[in-house]
Image (tube, rainbow, N blue to C red):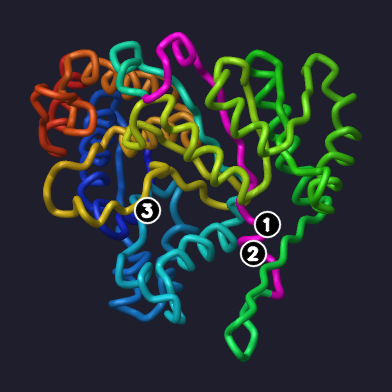
């Protein structure tokens, strides 16, 4: 099978972790007899430096012409610390989501037996936790207009907007995921305060009878934030709007023990994007200490969702699990007194595991 992949490494640790994911992807293609074709594009701060645009037209066309996008991270401190900046790396990510129609971000949260004590949460609370968060990605307050500041600079405003069509398509995906898993769906909103949340709840109540096998519960976002920490095993599939999903899925990362372990898939109308959930971590850039596992697991999701190659995806996941069991890990997982490998050494370990299978 021929696999055409656009590679957008981005900023900070992005190039380092994407390099390892590509090494693993190449090993899988060699193992299963696929032809991998990759082309690179600019995005984020590096794209601003080169072109003045965080998501250049050339990058967008590359994504449109590819079967999947493997994405690293974007962001740079010089933009974070400058509230007056007119162009920001994050605008490139938002533009990519909008132009590619990436309306659904899928983030699995699982635990690794050998890492249960790495989480700040008690072992008995998290052992066996396994749920998927589905976040709407192209609507809500991140995209709503009008948005801005008053002329005197003393007032700022953001607008949250959702349409029926946007809500229906993400809920349909969530119900379908629930049907494939344990048939429980948690719909997270703030319907006691927000008009957009009340529209979400109205539409979800209209759709629920079409999926009679799915147990549906509704939960306010503040309660969900507590429940994820207190009782993470109670969730199966969770669906919510853009900003709530952004916050809740980052919170859920502590269950696994490290942001460096959690992958994601952004699915939509055109080409899907596969990326780790963490940011660009500029403090670690170039130091060969970043955990590549989330990006490698994102490549596994790429094989599963973009190419429908489950055996390939499963072998990548198995190899990552084996590396963690063998303590072939970067410093964030090595623990006190443990030996930390470099980013490239972890990638090499996983590649070697795949070659020996």
Separation of residues labelled 3 and 1 (CA atoms): 25 Å
> Crowdedness of circle 1 by 10 Å Cα count: few (<14), some, many (20+)?
some
SS assignment at label 2: loop
Depicted 132 relative to depicted 299: above or below: above
Depicted 157 relative to depicted 160: above or below: below
Residue shown at the point (24%, 51%) measured from the top left? 13
The residue that label 3 is drawn on is: 6
The quadrant in which the N terminus is found is top left
Range of magenta residues: 120-146
Residue shown at the point (64%, 25%) measured from the top left? 237
On screen, residue 106 versus residue 15, left or right, reads right
Report x, y in % for residue 208: 85, 27
SS assignment at label 1: loop
Q: Are discs 1 and 2 less than 8 Å apart at CB?
A: yes
Q: Choose the circle earlier in sequence order: 3 or 1.
A: 3
Q: Nearer the viewer, residue 337 or 2?
A: 337
Q: Which residue lies furthest to the front in this view?
A: 154
The quadrant in which the C terminus is found is top left
The label nearer to you, 2 versus 3, is 2
Report x, y in % for residue 4: 38, 47
Report x, y in % for residue 89: 40, 67
The residue that label 2 is drawn on is: 143
Q: Nearer the viewer, residue 103 or 339?
A: 339
Residue shown at the point (13%, 54%) measured from the top left? 286
Depicted 203 relative to depicted 103: above or below: above
On screen, residue 192 versus residue 37, left or right, reads right
Asked whether 191 falls inside the magenta stretch, the response is: no
Q: Which of 11 and 60 is in front in this view?
A: 11
Asked whether 130 falls inside the magenta stretch, the response is: yes
The residue that label 1 is drawn on is: 139
């Amino acid at each position: 099978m021929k696999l055409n992949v656009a590679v957008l490494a981005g900023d900070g640790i992005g190039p380092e972790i994407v390099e390892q994911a590509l090494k693993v992807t190449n090993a899988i293609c060699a193992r299963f007899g696929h032809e991998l074709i990759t082309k690179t594009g600019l995005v984020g701060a590096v794209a601003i430096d080169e072109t003045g645009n965080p998501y250049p037209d050339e990058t967008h066309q590359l994504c449109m012409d590819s079967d999947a996008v493997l994405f690293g991270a974007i962001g740079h401190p010089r933009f974070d610390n400058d509230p007056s900046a007119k162009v920001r790396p994050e605008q490139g990510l938002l533009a990519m989501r909008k132009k590619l129609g990436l309306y659904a971000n899928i983030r699995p949260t699982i635990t690794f037996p050998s890492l249960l004590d790495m989480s700040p949460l008690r072992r008995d609370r998290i052992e066996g936790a396994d749920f998927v968060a589905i976040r709407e990605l192209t609507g809500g307050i991140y995209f709503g207009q009008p948005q801005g500041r008053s002329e005197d600079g003393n007032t700022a405003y953001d607008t949250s907007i959702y349409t029926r069509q946007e809500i229906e398509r993400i809920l349909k995906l969530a119900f379908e995921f629930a049907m494939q898993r344990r048939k429980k769906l948690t719909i997270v909103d703030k319907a006691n305060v927000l008009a957009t949340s009340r529209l979400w709840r109205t539409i979800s109540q209209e759709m629920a009878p079409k999926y009679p096998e799915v147990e549906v519960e509704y939960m306010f976002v503040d309660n969900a934030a507590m429940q994820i920490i207190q009782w993470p095993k109670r969730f199966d599939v969770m669906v919510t709007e853009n900003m709530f999903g952004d916050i809740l899925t980052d919170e859920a990362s502590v269950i696994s023990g490290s942001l460096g372990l959690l992958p994601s898939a952004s699915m939509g109308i055109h080409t899907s994007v596969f990326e780790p959930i963490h940011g660009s971590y500029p403090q670690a850039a170039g130091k060969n200490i970043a955990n590549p596992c989330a990006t490698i697991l994102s490549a596994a999701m790429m094989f599963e969702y973009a190419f429908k190659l489950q055996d390939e995806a499963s072998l990548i996941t198995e190899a990552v699990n084996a590396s963690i069991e063998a303590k072939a890990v970067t410093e964030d997982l090595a623990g006190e007194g443990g030996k930390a490998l470099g980013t490239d050494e972890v990638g090499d370990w996983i590649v070697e595991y795949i070659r020996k299978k």
